[in-house]
Amino acid sequence: MKSYKFKVNENGYTVNIKSHEDNVINLEVNGTSYDVIMQAEIKKSKTPTLVRAASKQPSVPLKVNPKSTKTKIVAPIPGTILSLNVKVGDTIKENDLLLVLEAMKMENNIVAEKSGVVSSIKVEVGQQVLQDALLIELE
């Protein structure tokens, strides 16, 4: 199991621990075997247990009200409105191009999530918008 080297009164000793059961230890000192009985039982070392706080509940997903007639189109990232491809009153289908948003020198096409009629446009060409800013409302 384990090997130790001791020096007592200038005499060298090599101790090899062969086995350990309860309070009896079988060891060998300079080639001679001994059984040593301990008065108190040696505590076994335990692997530490990692204790963590309970994980937080994941945030509840946004519930969509199926009776709601308005759909809000918001900016996915901050940027500048390059073009508006619809006007108030236009009937659009799902995936129709609504506007183009420039962000980090890239043009991003913003399309309709579902079919409907454009009820209001909250931005104009050249306007800078922040992330999650309301762009267009559909009914």
Image: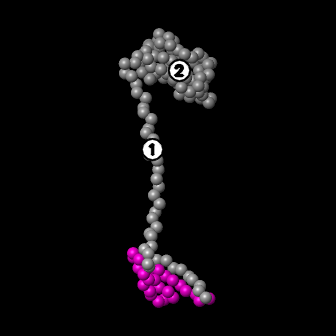
Please indicate whether residue 41 sits to the left or right of residue 7 in the image. Answer: left
Residue that sits furthest to the top in the current view: 89
Q: Is residue 67 left or right of residue 47?
A: left
Q: Is residue 77 magenta?
A: no
Q: Which mark is residue 96?
A: none
Q: Nearer the viewer, residue 63 or 118?
A: 63
Q: Which numbered dot is residue 134? A: 2
Query: Which residue is pictured at 45% across the width and 35% down the height?
Result: 59
Query: 10 Å neighbourhood of mark 2: few (<14), some, or many (≥20)?
Result: some
From this view, report whether residue 56 is shown above or below residue 100: below
User: Is 131 situated above or below 3?
Assistant: above
- Rendered image quadrant of residue 23: bottom left
- Residue drawn at x 45%, y 58% as measured from the top left: 49
Which residue has dot 1 on it?
55
Q: Label 2 to label 1, Cα distance in Å?
A: 33 Å
- Most common SS among magenta residues: strand
Q: In which quarter of the image is the C terminus?
A: top left
Residue 19 visible, this orientation: no
Q: Nearer the viewer, residue 126 or 26?
A: 26
**Residue drawn 42% across the image and 21% down it:** 114
Residue 69 rendering spot, x and y as whole percentages: 40, 16
Query: Which stretch appears magenta?
Result: 10-37
Q: Is residue 14 magenta?
A: yes
Amino acid type of the residue tagged 2 in the rendering: Leu
Residue farthest along the left direction in this orientation = 67
Q: Quadrant of residue 133?
A: top right
Where 66 falls versus 104 (above or below)?
Answer: above
- Residue 137 visible in the shown view: yes
x and y percent of residue 86 in the render?
51, 14
**Mark whose residue sits in front, 2 or 1:** 1
Q: In the structure shown, which secondary structural element does the residue marked by tag 2 occupy?
A: strand
Residue 101 coordinates in the image, percent (x, y): 57, 24
